[in-house]
Image (cartoon, coloured by chain):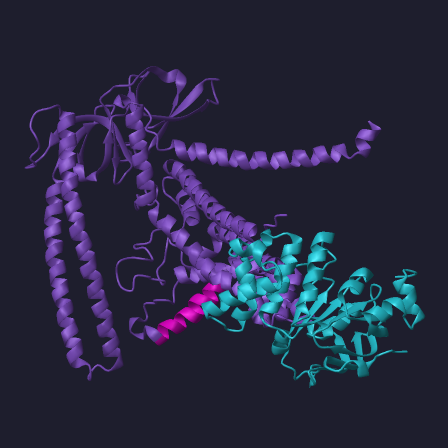
Chain colours: A purple, B cyan
Amino acid sequence: MGSFRKQGEPQVWGTAAALSITLLMVLTLLGVVMVNGLGFFWPSDTSLVTLKDGSRLLGEITSTEKATENHGKRIQFKVGNRDIYGQDFRWVDASEIRSTAYPDDAVTLERKERGNFYGFLKSLSLDRLRIPAGGTTWDDFLAARKSVDASRAKLRKSEKRMADLNSNAERLRLKVLKLSSADPVGNRAAIDSLNAKREKLLAEFNARLERLNDESAELNSHTAIFTDASGEEKEIPLTEIVRSYRPNTMGVFAKARFYAGKIRELLLDEPRESNTEGGLFPAIFGTVMMVLLMSVFSLPFGVVAAVYLREYAREGILVRLVRIAVNNLAGVPSIVYGVFGLGFFVYGIGSGIDQLFYPERLPTPTFGTGGILWASLTLALLTVPVVIVSTEEGLASVPKGLREGSLSLGATKFQTLTKVVIPMATPGIMTGLILAMARAAGEVAPLMIVGVVKLAPSLPIDGHFPFFHMDRKFMHLGFHIYDVGFQSPNVEAAKPMVFVTTLLLLAIVIAASSTAIHIRNKMKQKYTTKAF
Amino acid sequence: MQSDTPRKISDPVLEIVDLNLYYGASQALKDISLTIPRKEVTAFIGPSGCGKSTLLRCFNRMNDLLDNVRIEGSIKLDGEQITGPDVDVISLRRRVGMVFQQSNPFPKSIYENIVYGLRIAGVKDKAVLNETVEKSLRGAAIWDEVKDRLHDSALGLSGGQAQRVCIARAIAVNPEIILMDEPCSALDPIATAKIEELINELKEQYTVVIVTHNMQQAARVSDRTAFLYLGELIEFDETRKIFTNPENRHTEDYITGRFG
């Protein structure tokens, strides 16, 4: 026992235990997120439950737990039909259930609004819509949906054209504003011609709008009539339906196809229903673009600052103070950066830019309000200390002999830095970048006040001139988690979306970090291979 | 007590007069005066901390990299003063190349290592670069060993090869003087022999000043030897004389291994 202690075994076991606990916690976190997030899209069977009092309900089982009263179980059903029942979920005591069935004709509808609908298809009301005759009501329903979706797609094209018209008209309006605020009399002719052009665009826009409204109204008149579990009828326009399926008839492959479709929607589509349904594309795009922009700002500044501190600055009180400041900056709470960003970037620089370059749009702010540029700069500020510290470490690790070798060949200090020292310090710099990206991707608090919104109408990059809209507000996965999980009116229904969003955010951070780590390892290899 | 023999040296390349060097308060070199002949090999020997490396580093101003170094006295390269703040250190270092104790190839290809000095001087002509690479590598007696892998990383070379590539890199900028700071101390005997042979060839074209710990090496490669002790130049003479008939007792004790 004595020698066991002397050899330090207990300490080894202690450290190993601490490490395993940490690993276990991380893995549990990942596991919980994965299970909850990835399971969400798998279409589960719909059960038709008859209770002892004779009433029936139709829905998916979402969870079971021990009942508090009679030692039995209680089961949570997602019964949907928010417009009829008022809420999506219902708890049922297991002892109250008389029988459970899985009818083949139970239909699940994903609707654009008001959540899922669970019921049975009764009949169709298809005004003048032509569909191939014959077949069951379900077949007809599918055919009708197909035709309605095709018409919807056409309308969407028209909507896109209208958006172009609108943005062109807006540009003309801003031009007119600019001209008239500069010199309303001298620019009379130009203003008039621009106005005429704008009128023309608006006229086309209005004509298209009218046509679009007519066509939408006609599409909306095609409906299907469903009954819910208790036999109540509900008429649902086909245009309202995003997906319709009969989960009890689906095999594993059909379900897998469905699952893939949901994942595709998640990654590539816009959100619906106050973000609790649909895709996350704008948030993914916003997060990635913000992190990249942040790197573009933070990397050069951090590297240059570190090079100055390490290579040029003479050690003294001032440099020591700067170092202390840099180290402490890394510890400042991020919300403080957010407030600073709002005051300095948004109200300070942003308003200045507006007054200089966009005076005609005032009082509507262009850069004088939160946007992706200011958010990236704020986060760059937040992460620059990390880059500085690791770059300094990278520079310090370059052997003195290499600097001397370069200088002895007649290189200036700057040439030595750019040709030998900084390339060799890149693994250190990359480490800083990895840490910075991971931190930036996860920050939410400062973003909330410098440009992140719940729902951004358009992406910061699009097909309209000048393509990069740095002034635009954007969506962010971290904020999305907060918003969907804690600010949405229907928290229970949004819960799976929170897990999915968390999973995506983690995936993005991991993907970015592993790419950077891969590059760093390649560089390390390049600069250290020494074979004898 | 100095035994400098300027009258024997007809064509001096470096003339050091009353050189004093201080690191902060402590004096590292005391009243050094010596003359280094052109196209000969001069060796500095002496026990650790005697100032031989410091003296060597005065010739290409490598001491400038250290803070609080103060130099008094004069060093002239071809009659031109090279101490003081007005000297163009960059062009001085092109004229006075250096090879270090630890071989220090850059983490680039062998080719890029050799042309480094030319590239930073702004040479872009491919033909000139290629020609220099071959000439320098041949000059450093390593052309045959690396000619097939010029574009491989220089970090893959063995210690002796890397040191010869560093010598090639130094002669690529065509200096007048090559300073060598214990170039063989990290090498095995075979690699050491190759470098020594190379030093003998180099003196056809260059002046070589070498610092060495190894007395046999000084005896083998150098024409003249300076013995330094505690920052002072004790004796400077032809190598043959130093090793067979030193005038100073200190020198004799050191050479015969009584201290050091």
Q: Is residue A514 left or right of residue A42?
A: right
Q: Give coordinates of residue A230: x percent, y percent.
A: 24, 23
Closer-to-camera residue (A310/A363): A310
Image point (43%, 68%), residue name: A347
Residue B229 appears in view: no
Residue B2, picture quadrant: bottom right
Image point (10%, 57%), residue name: A207
Q: Give coordinates of residue B42: x percent, y percent.
A: 76, 71
Closer-to-camera residue (B210/A86): B210
Residue A70 appears in view: yes
Closer-to-camera residue (A254/A229): A254
Q: Where does the magenta region start and end?
A: A340-356
- Residue A275's place in the image compared with A131, above or below, is below
Q: Is residue B49 left or right of residue A367?
A: right
Q: Give coordinates of residue A124: x percent, y percent.
A: 12, 30
Residue A90, picture quadrant: top left
